[in-house]
C-alpha cells in the first residue's frame, strides 16, 4: 500500500493493482532499465497527483474515475517501453485510524437510528391494529346487545299479546281483562331486561272502567 495525502491533508493508504503485458520485448529491454520499477514509480507519482486534488470523501467515492486516469497515464507512458497497461484497480483505500473510527461511529449511529425508526413504526402499527380490533369488538358487542334487547322486547310483546288473547277468548269482562293484563305487566317488570311496554288498544276502555270503579268505592 502507498501512503498518499489528500487535498484535505489526510493520509490514506492506497493499494493499487496493475495488469499489463509486454508487447515489444526489445523495447522493454533496451528503452528502460527496469520497466516494472518504472511502472511502479509512475503509478505512485500519478496517484499522488490525482488523489492530492481530491478530498477524502471524493477519493472514497471516485474509485472508478481514479482507475481510468491512472490507466490512461500509464498506458501512454509505457507504450514506448513496449508495454501495454490493460487495467488498473485501486484494491483498497484505507483512511487514517482516527477517521476510520469516526466513520464507524457514524455508521453505527445510522444503523441504530434506522433500527429505532423501524421499532417505533412497528410499535405504532401494533397499537393501531390493537385499537382497531378493540373498536370492532366493542361495535360487535353493542350490536349484539341491541339485537338481544330487540328480541327480548319482541318476545315480551308477543307474550303479553298471547295472554291478552287468551283472557279475551274466555269472554272475561273488561275489568277482569284489564286486571289480568296488569298482573302480567307486574311479572314482566320483575325481570332485569329493559322494559318496553306494549299496551293493546282494546285495554284502554277497560283500564278506564277500573279507575272509575275504584273512584266509586271511595
Image (cartoon, rainbow, N blue to C red):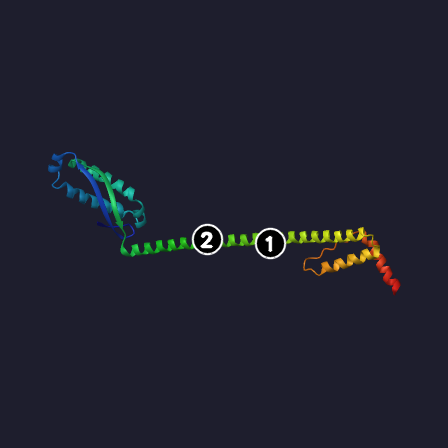
Image side of residue 92 versus residue 113, left or right: left
Crowdedness near tag 2: few (<14), some (14–19) or many (≥20) residues, C-alpha within 10 Å? few
Circles 1 and 2, Cβ within 8 Å, touching? The answer is no
Of residue 46 and residue 156, the one placed in the foreground of this image is 156
Q: Which residue is at 32% across, 46% downward?
A: 61
Q: Which residue is at 85% across, 57% downward?
A: 209
Earlier in the chain: of badge 1 and badge 2, it is 2
Q: Quadrant of residue 184?
A: bottom right
Residue 78 coordinates in the image, percent (x, y): 18, 38
Of residue 110 and residue 201, the one placed in the foreground of this image is 201
Dot 2: element = helix
Image side of residue 68 versus residue 189, left or right: left
Residue 77 coordinates in the image, percent (x, y): 19, 38
Name the image quarter holding the C terminus: bottom right
Q: Which residue is at 24% across, 48% downward?
A: 14
Image side of residue 7 versus residue 40, left or right: right
Q: Residue furthest front?
A: 170
Question: Which of the two discs, 1 and 2, sits closer to the camera?
Answer: 1
Image side of residue 158 versus residue 49, left or right: right
Crowdedness near tag 1: few (<14), some (14–19) or many (≥20) residues, C-alpha within 10 Å? few
Dot 1: element = helix
Residue marked by disc 2: 122
Residue marked by disc 1: 141
Residue 198 vs 23, above or below: the answer is below
Residue 195 coordinates in the image, percent (x, y): 71, 57
Amino acid at each position: 500500500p502507498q501512503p498518499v495525502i489528500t487535498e484535505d491533508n489526510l493520509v490514506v493508504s492506497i493499494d493499487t493493482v496493475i495488469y499489463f503485458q509486454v508487447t515489444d520485448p526489445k523495447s522493454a529491454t533496451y528503452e528502460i532499465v527496469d520497466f516494472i520499477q518504472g511502472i511502479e514509480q509512475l503509478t505512485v507519482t500519478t496517484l499522488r497527483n490525482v488523489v492530492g486534488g481530491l478530498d477524502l470523501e471524493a477519493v472514497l467515492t471516485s474509485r472508478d474515475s481514479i482507475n481510468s486516469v491512472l490507466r490512461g497515464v500509464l498506458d501512454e507512458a509505457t507504450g514506448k517501453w513496449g508495454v501495454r497497461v490493460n487495467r488498473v484497480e485501486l484494491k483498497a483505500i484505507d483512511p487514517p485510524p482516527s477517521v476510520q473510527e469516526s466513520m464507524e461511529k457514524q455508521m453505527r449511529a445510522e444503523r441504530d437510528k434506522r433500527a429505532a425508526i423501524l421499532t417505533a413504526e412497528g410499535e405504532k402499527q401494533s397499537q393501531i391494529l390493537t385499537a382497531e380490533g378493540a373498536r370492532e369488538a366493542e361495535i360487535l358487542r353493542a350490536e349484539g346487545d341491541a339485537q338481544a334487547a330487540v328480541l327480548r322486547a319482541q318476545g315480551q310483546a308477543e307474550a303479553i299479546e298471547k295472554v291478552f288473547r287468551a283472557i279475551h277468548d274466555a269472554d272475561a269482562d273488561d275489568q277482569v281483562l284489564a286486571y289480568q293484563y296488569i298482573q302480567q305487566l307486574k311479572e314482566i317488570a320483575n325481570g332485569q331486561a329493559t322494559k318496553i311496554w306494549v299496551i293493546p288498544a282494546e285495554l284502554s276502555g277497560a283500564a278506564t272502567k277500573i279507575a272509575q270503579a275504584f273512584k266509586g268505592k271511595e
